[in-house]
């Protein structure tokens, strides 16, 4: 069976599933499949989602944390508001220095988990897009080190390519466990991957804050 045909079917399957289950995008399954397998988001957690529009990861995270938790979505674009009191969204560029305070002002306490599915504008030139994606992931990491509590978790989109190994090495300096993941819901032909970093090292946090 041709690979492209299988890929189209898979894409169509998650698209229809998201529609039927009232999710804002099929991307929701990339988070929920990983969260189910690795249990890195728990009931009652405070979660920050960087690059969150239209909000399907917020929907998945909200279901896991429940009303004893809190989810904050951040995006350059407005996100259609949620009616739940423990879900908030803001318009911000998380690469700007003022984003840290903007986000902290909304949080009830330091975050247990930071997510980032942020994508840069795609140029179509593979090397450029790869570098931009890793750069955005690196900026998400930098902010995460100021947002997370010790032992917190970080889940971020990256692209497969020659810059990935260097980024993984950097993340490993700060987290005890780092896995590179390709969720089933992510198209096999796309170079999109996710990095799941668990258990933020306490010394790493102190370093960043001093
Ligand atoms: C693939 S979408 C996220 C989809 C989301 N996970 C969902 O499930 O609905 C990527 C988002 O990253 C956002 N983004 C890219 N750079 C950003 C930045 N510097 N600050 C905030 N958001 C950013 C884009 O505006 C876009 O909405």
Image (cartoon, rainbow, N blue to C red):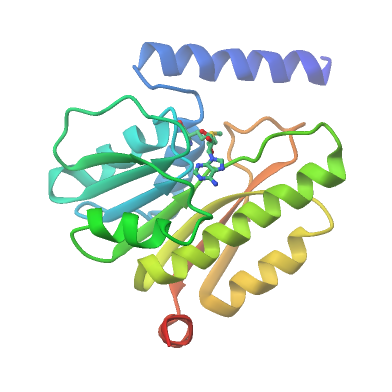
In the image, 79 versus 39, the foreground residue is 79
10 above or below 144?
above
- Camera-side residue of 18 and 136: 136
Q: Position of residue 118 (x, y in %)?
A: 55, 43
The relative height of residue 22 versus residue 52 in the rendered view (above or below) is above
Give the x, y percent position of residue 54. Answer: 43, 27
Question: Split into 4 quadrants, where in the image is the N terminus?
Answer: top right
Q: Based on the displayed image, in which of its 4 quarters is residue 125 positioned?
A: top right
Q: Is residue 65 left or right of residue 149?
A: left
Q: How many marks?
A: 0
- Residue 196 appears anywhere in the view: no
Q: Is residue 202 left or right of residue 134?
A: left
The one of 132 and 64 positioned closer to us in this rendering = 132
Tell me the quarter of the image containing the C terminus.
bottom left
Identify whether 81 is placed above or below 136. Answer: above
Residue 76 x/y as whole percent: 48, 38
Q: Quadrant of residue 190?
A: top right
Residue at left offset 47%, top offset 64%? 143
Q: Is residue 21 above or below residue 183?
A: above
- In percent of width and height, residue 209 lies at 42, 82
Whether residue 138 can be seen here: yes
């Amino acid at each position: 069976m041709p690979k492209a045909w299988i890929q189209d079917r898979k894409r169509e399957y998650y698209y229809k599933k998201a529609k039927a289950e009232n999710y804002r995008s099929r991307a929701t399954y990339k988070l929920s499949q990983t969260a189910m397998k690795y249990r890195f988001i728990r009931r009652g957690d405070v979660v920050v989602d960087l690059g969150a529009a239209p909000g399907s990861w917020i929907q998945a995270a909200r279901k896991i944390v429940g009303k004893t938790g809190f989810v904050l979505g951040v995006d350059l674009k407005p996100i259609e508001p949620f009616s739940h009191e423990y879900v908030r969204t803001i318009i911000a560029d998380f690469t700007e220095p003022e984003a840290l305070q903007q986000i902290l002002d909304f949080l009830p306490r330091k975050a247990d988990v930071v997510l980032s599915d942020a994508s840069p504008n795609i140029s179509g030139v593979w090397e450029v897009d790869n570098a931009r994606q890793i750069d955005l992931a690196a900026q998400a990491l930098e902010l995460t080190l100021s947002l997370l509590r010790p032992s917190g978790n970080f889940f971020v989109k990256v692209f497969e390519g020659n810059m990935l190994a260097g980024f993984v090495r950097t993340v490993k300096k700060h987290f005890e466990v780092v896995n590179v993941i390709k969720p089933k819901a992510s198209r096999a032909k796309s170079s999109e991957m996710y990095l799941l970093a668990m258990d933020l090292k306490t010394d790493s946090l102190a370093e960043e804050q001093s």
